[in-house]
Structures are given as structure tokens and as C-alpha cells.
Image (cartoon, rainbow, N blue to C red):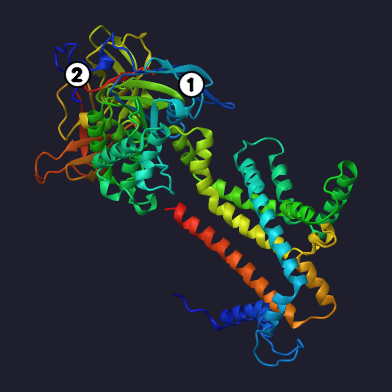
Amino acid sequence: MKQHSLALKLSAGFGFVFLYAPIIALIIYSFNESKLVTVWGGWSLKWYAELFRNEQIMSAAWVSLKIAFISATLAAILGTLAGFVLSRMRRFRGKTMMAGWVTAPLVMPEVITGLSLLLLFVAMENMFGWPAGRGTTTIVIAHTTFCLAYVAVVVQSRLASMDETLEEAAMDLGAKPVSLFFLITLPMISPAILSGWLLSFTLSLDDLVIASFVSGPGNSTLPMVIFSKVRLGVTPEINALATLMILVVSVAVIAAIVIMRRQNRFQKP
Amino acid sequence: MSVSSGSPIITSQTLPTWRQKEAEPFVRIEQINKQFGDFTAVNDVSLDIYKNELFCLLGGSGSGKSTLLRMLAGFESPTSGRIIIDGVDMSHVPPWERPVNMMFQSYALFPHLSVEANVAFGLKREGLPNHEVKKRVAEMLDMVQLGHLARRKPHMLSGGQRQRVALARSLVKQPKLLLLDEPLGALDKKLREETQFELMRIQEELGITFVVVTHDQEEAMTLATRIGVMNNGVIVQTAEPHEVYEYPNNRFVAEFIGNVNIFDGTVVTDERDSATIHCADTDSLIYVDHGISCAPNQGVSVAIRPEKMRISREAPTEINNHVSGVISEVAYMGSQSIFKVRLPSGKEIRVTQPNAQRDTGDRLTWDDKVHLSWDADSSVVLTS
């Protein structure tokens, strides 16, 4: 193992402190006994208990999880189809442009995505009366739209690195296209789909901007509730909530990374 | 398969199928063309392959051999022409309905399935009952000596073991025709030799017709009953291995298979049972013991294999078929030595000599002036 120089170690250390010091401070303060956020009053789980008694936050959390689950699932299905099209269609005029269109939501400013979706939903409601008003449905549609792009990219790159002779071998051994898909292709890309699902889940859980545009009364997601509460002043309760969210998101992201890693090692003997 | 072309009487009983005039071919490839855009990968190929043959398609990369194989498997459809297997026109039958299986160069083992499940995959698609599948998979794995590894995943196997799983998987459905794409390409030299004989044993045991694609001429020579040499999408020669080596029908085949010295010249005399050729590089006329049947003064090439030339310090007594030069390179290989001899014209000739005697202390060496000679029946005259 090569010895790292002191400068390298220092800069790495500085970088990590810069990135994670605020989060660590937040986690520590979530166990604060004191009612004042900035004053340390000893260790306590008081604010966690308080949090679970707060009905507004609990119902917002439930809405958020529900939306995240449904939109991640829809995005996984639609994104897989999109990824398939992108990697398997033979070259045709405009293929690159189509690939660009699918991935554009990744770089689109959220304000624009949110605003344009809001306009679309209002126009649709005026024209055919669906979706009636704004609420869970519209948030799910909006989240599916931008999560789909992530899944499509992950699935496409998995398909691109997959040995195409595997599919030929399956056909050669008598598998018709449908059984070929379910017996060979799907198991091969399922880790990519799963990690795409986990990413979508966390993206949906984290989103504030788009949700604020397309949600309706009584359907506030957790980030929206937090944001409105913070504007009135930070309470230790929010610290506790944030800590829990960090936990959920980290678990999902780490799981996604582990799954991708394992499949890479396993596919390339 | 031992076929001696020199034996005077061959009855039709002992004659291999492809030499019997009335034999019905098992696979007929009729005027197949395959075009990718402007590029012609396979150009008007017709070929008959007989039952129980181990036919090798031999050629360099881009010669069209793999495309031809993929058309037999059904992964590519021919632009024009027909493929008939066992009397049925297969041109528009999808791969999953063909009585053909393929062993892929990359083996293409399903990484998420165990060895057992890989081999069982094809049988399950046929809807065979479970116990029947189990029985046949076990038999097949025993045949390739992998019974003890049935539950392993492919990534836990060595290269040679994977190759045998791939073979078992392609044989278990008992196809009428087995296609093998560079079957030994990924193995190291020692394993290759063992596996060659293994393949030949299995082929004889099961009586399945094999078509092997390879770029390795040695592999083709040892494995094949017949070889089809391909170049630029065309089959240039179809013949038994020894014929391809000893009687190549054109310059490409002569140069592609083994080493060869080629002299360009013009025909001086051409009779029914002999011909003489004048060549600027040689000291004498080249005399061959067969007629060429061509126009007088036609330009031809004379091909002579390095091992069919004699090398000596003394001048030969014959009038024809010799040339002299200076040794420019010597390579001692143990069982044989390779000499490169530079002719006065600047041309380099390759000669190999078996080291039949132990070193006598009078070995030929660099800068020795030597005479090369050969027999009238050693050379091949090529008109194309």
C-alpha cells in the first residue's frame, strides 16, 4: 500500500469536514434536551418522542412515503422500457436526440419542471377534467416524470454492457422472445432496475420544489412541511425528523451502490 | 478419420460420404448472399455438408465465416439464397425453432444460473417433464466430466470448465447440427490440444454433424473431415485437410495454410503428363509431372512447401528443379531446422529440414552457399 502524503490526507480530511460537519452537528443536536436549538442541554430522546406525537408531521411523512413508493415503482417500469428502447433500437436518424430528450429532466432546473407540469395539469383539468384538482396523483405523476430519466440511464448502461450473445444463446436453445425477456434479460438487468428504484425513491422523498408546484391543499409532503415549519423558526423536533430522513436516504443510496457493485463483480468473471 | 488418397482401390463402402456421387447432403447452402448496407459479407456461397461430418470453415477475420455460421443458426437472415437442413428449408425459420444449436465463442453461459440450470435451459423450453430433464442433464454433465460441479455458478469455473459447460448445453438437446464458433479460441495451448481430441471423440460418439468456424489452420487440419477456406465472403476451396495442404487450388489457399515458397513464371511447354515453366528466380526450368492445360506463355505461380525442398552444399545432378543461394538465417528448433536462403535475385526462400541425425559438426550455417532442389511431384502450379 502506498503511503499517502500529509497534504493529501489533510485535504481529504478538510473536504470531509466541509461536507459532513453540518450534518453531524444536526444529528448531535437532534438528541439535545434543551428547547432552544442552539443551546446544549444534555442528551435526550425527548424530541423523537415529540415528533411521533406530531400528527401534522406524521401524516406528511405518510404522504411522502406513499408518493415515493408509487412513483419509484412507476418510474422503474417506464424507465426500464425507455432504457430498452435506447439501447436496443438500431441506429436511426434522431436516435441521439431521443436519448437527449429522455435524459433532459436530469439537468432541467426543478423550477421549470415544476412550473411546466403545473401548467400542463391545469390545462388538462380544463380540457378533460382530469386530474381533478392537485394532490397526491399530480405529485406522483410529476415525480415519475423526472425519476424515469434516472432509471432509463441506469438500465440503458446495464443493457449496453450486457453480452448480447446471452440472448442469442437463449433463442438458440429454444426461448421465444417473451420467455427470453423474463428468463434471461430481466434477471440480468434486475439489479439495475432495483438500484434505479431506490434512487427514484430517495429523489421523490427529497423533492421540495416540484412538489410545491403541483401539490394541492391537504397533500403536503414531508419536505414541504419541514420547509414551512423552518420559516417560523427551527425547533429541535425538526432536527430529529431530519436525522431520520438522512438515515432512510443513506440506507437507500448505500443499498443501491452495493447492488450495482455486486452485479458488476458477478457479471464479469 | 483416415483417408489415404494414395491407396489404389477405394470401394464405395469405405468412401466418405462427401466423395460418393449419389450421397444426399444433410445441409445445403444454396447461393447464399448476405449484405450489410454496401458491404457484402457473404457472396454467393453454395456448400453441401453431409451427415456426421465435422466441417471447418476456415478464414481470417472479415472473411464471412462467422456470418455464414450465424445464418445457419438463424441470427441473420440471408439477403438471398436458401439454407436447407435435413430436407427442410430453414431460410425463414426463427432460431428458436431450428434443430440447430450453437456453441458461442464467448460461451455465453447464463451468469445467474447454475451449471445444471444452464444445461437444463434448452430442455425446459421443450416442455419435457422434470425427471426427464434431470436425467438428461446429469448424463450430459457426466459426459463432459462436470457432474461434481453441477451446482456452481459459471463465474466459479475455470475457462476449460466453462467451455465444457457450453458444449454440454449445446449438445443436450441433441441437435441435428451443432455449430461451434471458435470453440477452442479462449483456451491455452495444452488444453486446446486435449479438447480437440475430446471434441472429435464426442462427435463420433453422438453422430451429430458439426460445423466449426475457426481462424486457426492447425485446429482446422486436426479436427475437420473437410475444410472450406473462406476469403472475402467467398469459399475459395472445399476439400479434405491433406488436399487443402498438398493441392491448394489457388494462391490464397496456398499462402493461408502453412508456409509456402512461390515462384512466378511463364509456361514453356505444356503436355498431357508434364510441363516446364520458366522462372526468373531459378537457375533452371521448373519441371512438373502433370499437365497444366493452359495457353502457352501463360503466367503461373509455382508453390513449393518448405519441407519438400532439399538443401545441400553440393550442386544437384538433375537438369531441372534447382536453385542456388546463400543462407541468410538459421533457426534451430530441435526436431527440425528452418533455413532462409537468399537467391541472387534477392528473393528469400524458406526451407525446413528434419534433424534426423545428431549434430555431425558439419552443420549448415549463415553465409553458406547452398543448392536447393525438389522433385517434380512436389510443386503445385497455381493459375489463379
Question: In the image, residue B383 lies at what x, y percent?
Answer: 36, 17
Q: What residue type is labelled 1?
A: Asn
Q: Which of A7 and B93 is in front in this view?
A: B93
Tell me which numbered mark, 2 or 1, is placed earlier along the sequence: 2
Judging by the rendered image, the residue that carries numbered circle 1 is B43
- Residue A77 seen anywhere in this rendered image of the structure: yes
Question: In the image, residue B7 lies at what x, y percent?
Answer: 14, 17
Q: Which chain carries label 2?
A: B
Q: Tell me the number on the disc at residue B5.
A: 2
Q: Which of B259 and A201 is in front in this view?
A: A201
Q: Which chain carries label 1?
A: B
Q: In this view, does A15 lie to the left or right of B27?
A: right
Residue at the image point whose x is 74% and y is 91% from the top: A39
Q: Which SS class for mark 2? A: loop
Question: In the image, residue A143 lies at what x, y percent?
Answer: 74, 55
Q: Is residue A43 left or right of residue B298?
A: right
